[in-house]
Image: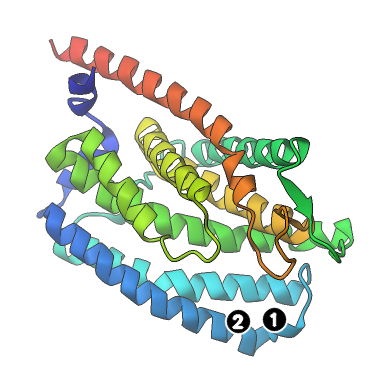
C-alpha cells in the first residue's frame, strides 16, 4: 500500500518538472528557513504599520479600521517572503507560478469546496468544545452587534486567507512537491509537517494538545492538496478555519480555555475539538488517494 502511494503520479508533484531546473531538497529547506527568518521581521513591521495607519491598538474589534489593520498586517507580514519565493521559482526554476498549485481548471469550484469543508471543521470544533464544557466565555467579554460583524467579516477573511495561503504556498506548494518527488509522497508529507510544526514552536501559551492538532492538521492539509492536485481548496480551507477560530471563536464569541484571562487569545481546546473532523477527512483522503493510485497503476500496466 505504501509503495502504491509513493508511486502515485500526482499532478501537483509532476508540475515541478515543467521548469528548466528543479530545486534540490536541502536547498529548498534552506530557502524556507531564510523565508521564515524574513517573515519574522516583516510580521513585526506589518504589526507596526497596522497600528500606525489605523491606530488599531485603540480601536475595538469589529470596526472597519480594525479589519483594515488586520489586512495590512497580513499582507506586509507574509507578502515579502512569498514574493521572494515567487522570484526564485520564476527565475531560478524558470517555471510558471501556476504550477505551484494554481492552475485555472475548476479553480472556483475547488476554492468553494475547500471553503465549505473548512467551515464545517471549525464549526464542529466550536460546537463540540462548548458542548463538552472545554472552553468558556472570557469574563467581561462584550459582544459586538452582529450586523457590524457581518460588515467586516469579508475583510477579516481576506486577511486570514492571505496568511493561510502564504503558508500553503511555502509548505504544500513548494516544499512538499520537491520532497515528495525526491523521497516519495509519504516522506514528503511527513517532512513538510515537521517543518510546519517547527515554524509554530514559539506560539505563546501553546500546549501539547495544540501540537497534536498541528501535526494532524498539517498532514490533512497536505493530503487534501494532493487529493485536489492544487492549492485552491486547501488555501480556502486554511483561511476560513483561521477566520472561524480567531474572528468568530476568540474575538466575537470570546471563547477561551477554562481559566484563561480575556487578554490572552488562547483556546487550545478549541483546536483540539477540530481533530475528530480532521481525522475523518484525513481517512477519506487517504482511501481516495489509494484508490485513485491503483487505477493509475492499472492503466499504466
Question: Secondary structure beneath disc 2?
Answer: helix
- Return the residue nearer the eye: 283 or 28: 283
Percent position (x, y) of residue 17? 15, 44
Pointer 1 residue: 56
Contact flag, marks 1 and 2 (Cβ < 8 Å): yes
Q: Is residue 38 above or below residue 184?
A: below
Mark 1: secondary structure: helix
Please tell me which residue lies in front, 125 or 101. Answer: 125
Q: Which mark is residue 134?
A: none
Quadrant of res 229: top left
Residue drawn at x 52%, y 25% is 280
User: Residue 256: in sight, yes or no?
Assistant: yes
Q: Splitting the image into 4 quarters, where does residue 87 fall?
A: bottom left
Mark 1 is surrounded, within 10 Å at the Cα level, by few (under 14), some (14 to 19) or many (20 or more) other residues, namely many
Give the side of residue 160 with respect to residue 165, left or right.
right
Along the horizontal axis of the image, is 189 left or right of 164? left
Residue 273 location (% of width, % of height): 62, 38
In the rendered image of this protein, does residue 211 appear above or below residue 199? above
Q: Residue at x 71, y 43 (%)?
A: 134
Q: Which residue is mark 2?
A: 50
Q: Nearer the viewer, residue 204 or 27?
A: 204
In this rendered view, identify the residue nearer to me: 150 or 248.
248
Between discs 1 and 2, the one toward the N terminus = 2
Could you give the CA–CA distance between mark 1 and mark 2, rounded to whole angstroms? 7 Å
Amino acid at each position: 500500500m505504501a509503495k502504491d502511494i509513493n508511486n502515485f503520479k500526482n499532478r501537483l508533484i509532476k508540475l515541478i518538472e515543467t521548469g528548466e531546473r528543479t530545486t534540490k531538497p536541502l536547498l529548498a529547506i534552506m530557502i524556507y528557513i531564510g523565508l521564515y527568518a524574513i517573515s519574522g521581521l516583516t510580521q513585526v513591521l506589518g504589526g507596526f504599520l497596522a497600528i500606525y495607519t489605523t491606530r488599531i491598538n485603540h480601536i475595538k474589534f469589529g470596526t472597519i479600521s480594525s479589519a483594515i489593520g488586520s489586512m495590512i498586517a497580513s499582507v506586509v507580514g507574509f507578502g515579502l517572503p512569498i514574493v521572494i519565493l515567487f522570484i526564485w521559482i520564476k527565475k531560478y526554476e524558470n517555471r510558471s507560478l501556476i504550477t505551484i498549485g494554481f492552475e485555472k481548471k475548476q479553480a472556483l469550484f475547488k476554492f468553494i469546496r475547500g471553503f465549505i469543508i473548512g467551515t464545517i471543521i471549525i464549526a464542529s470544533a466550536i460546537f463540540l468544545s462548548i458542548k463538552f464544557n472545554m472552553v468558556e466565555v472570557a469574563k467581561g467579554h462584550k459582544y459586538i452587534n452582529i450586523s457590524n460583524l457581518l460588515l467586516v467579516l469579508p475583510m477579516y477573511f481576506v486577511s486570514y486567507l492571505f496568511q493561510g495561503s502564504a503558508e500553503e504556498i511555502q509548505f504544500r506548494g513548494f516544499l512538499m512537491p520537491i520532497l515528495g518527488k525526491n523521497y516519495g509522497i509519504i516522506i514528503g508529507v511527513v517532512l513538510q509537517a515537521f517543518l510546519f510544526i517547527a515554524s509554530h514552536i514559539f506560539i505563546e501559551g501553546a500546549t501539547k494538545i495544540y501540537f497534536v492538532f498541528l501535526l494532524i492538521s498539517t498532514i490533512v492539509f497536505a493530503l487534501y492538496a494532493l487529493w485536489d492536485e492544487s492549492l485552491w481548496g486547501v488555501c480556502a480551507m486554511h483561511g476560513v478555519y483561521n477566520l472561524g477560530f480567531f474572528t468568530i471563536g476568540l474575538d466575537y464569541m470570546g471563547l477561551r480555555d477554562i481559566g484563561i484571562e480575556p487578554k490572552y487569545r488562547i483556546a487550545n481546546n478549541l483546536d483540539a475539538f477540530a481533530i475528530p473532523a480532521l481525522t475523518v477527512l484525513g481517512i477519506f483522503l487517504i482511501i481516495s488517494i489509494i484508490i485513485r493510485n491503483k487505477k493509475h497503476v492499472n492503466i499504466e500496466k
